[in-house]
């Protein structure tokens, strides 16, 4: 019986996350009402509050889920290459391309920084995508492909630039031109062969 309850709780939580994601993407955070998410997910309002305490709690969980998925997408793209430089390029391009994904655009790039606040949003970003960027830069420096330098400030500079570029793409900026600019920026970091 306990397994059934645990499974039921997990299913309820997943239903709320899925419906929350759908509504936050379609309508934006400020237009979503937690009771309507619960109703659409087929659960009671009390169940929604039990799992997430508030609309902000549900949003925070959705943001964390989307951030993790994006981090995995970036890592998977990078892992398609053995060459460390190509790994960096593929990961960065994948992150930029995510700006065209409606879920990433609305939830991560538009709503999350204002709803969660900059510090919490950055913490979530660092736990997913930014962590991969710092690891890639560390490997490149260790291999002598880029200058040996403090990696953390470089990772923050690139992460900030890519977040801004992804938001620009999300708002209609040209992805191809942005990727070309990114390639020029990254090439400037590379040690001469």
Image: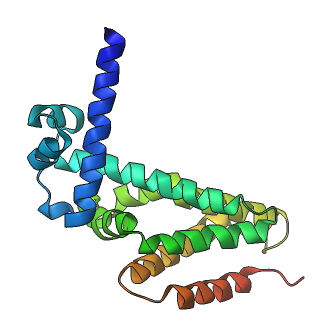
Question: Residue 109's spot in the image, x, y percent?
Answer: 36, 69
- State the image quarter where residue 78 is shown: bottom right
Q: Is residue 151 left or right of residue 120?
A: right
Write the residue at 30% across / 70% down: 110
Looking at the image, the residue that sits furthest to the top is 1
Question: Residue 74's spot in the image, x, y percent?
Answer: 58, 61
- State the image quarter where residue 185 is shown: bottom right
- Rendered view: 100 above or below 4: below
Looking at the image, the residue that sits furthest to the right is 193
Can residue 52 be seen by looking at this rendering? yes
Write the residue at 27% across / 56% down: 22
The one nearer the camera, 124 or 9, is: 9
Write the residue at 28% across / 26% down: 9
Q: Is residue 133 left or right of residue 85?
A: left
Question: Residue 5's spot in the image, x, y percent?
Answer: 29, 17
Question: Residue 8's spot in the image, x, y percent?
Answer: 29, 24
Write the residue at 72% across / 81% down: 189
How many discs mark residues in the rendered view?
A: 0
């Amino acid at each position: 019986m306990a397994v059934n309850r645990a499974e039921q709780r997990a299913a309820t939580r997943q239903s709320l996350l899925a419906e929350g994601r759908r509504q936050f993407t379609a309508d934006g955070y400020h237009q979503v009402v937690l009771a309507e998410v619960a109703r659409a997910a087929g659960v009671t309002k009390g169940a929604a509050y039990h799992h997430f305490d508030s609309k902000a709690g549900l949003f925070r969980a959705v943001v964390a889920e989307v951030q993790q998925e994006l981090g995995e997408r970036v890592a998977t793209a990078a892992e398609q290459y053995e060459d460390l430089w190509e790994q960096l390029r593929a990961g960065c391009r994948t992150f930029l391309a995510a700006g065209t994904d409606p879920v990433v655009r609305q939830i991560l790039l538009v709503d999350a920084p204002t709803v969660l606040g900059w510090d919490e949003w950055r913490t979530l970003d660092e736990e997913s995508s930014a962590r991969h960027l710092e690891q890639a830069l560390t490997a490149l420096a260790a291999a002598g492909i880029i200058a040996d330098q403090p990696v953390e400030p470089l990772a923050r500079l690139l992460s900030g630039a890519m977040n801004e570029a992804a938001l620009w793409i999300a708002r209609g900026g040209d992805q191809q031109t942005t990727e070309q600019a990114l390639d020029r920026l990254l090439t400037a970091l590379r040690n001469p062969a």
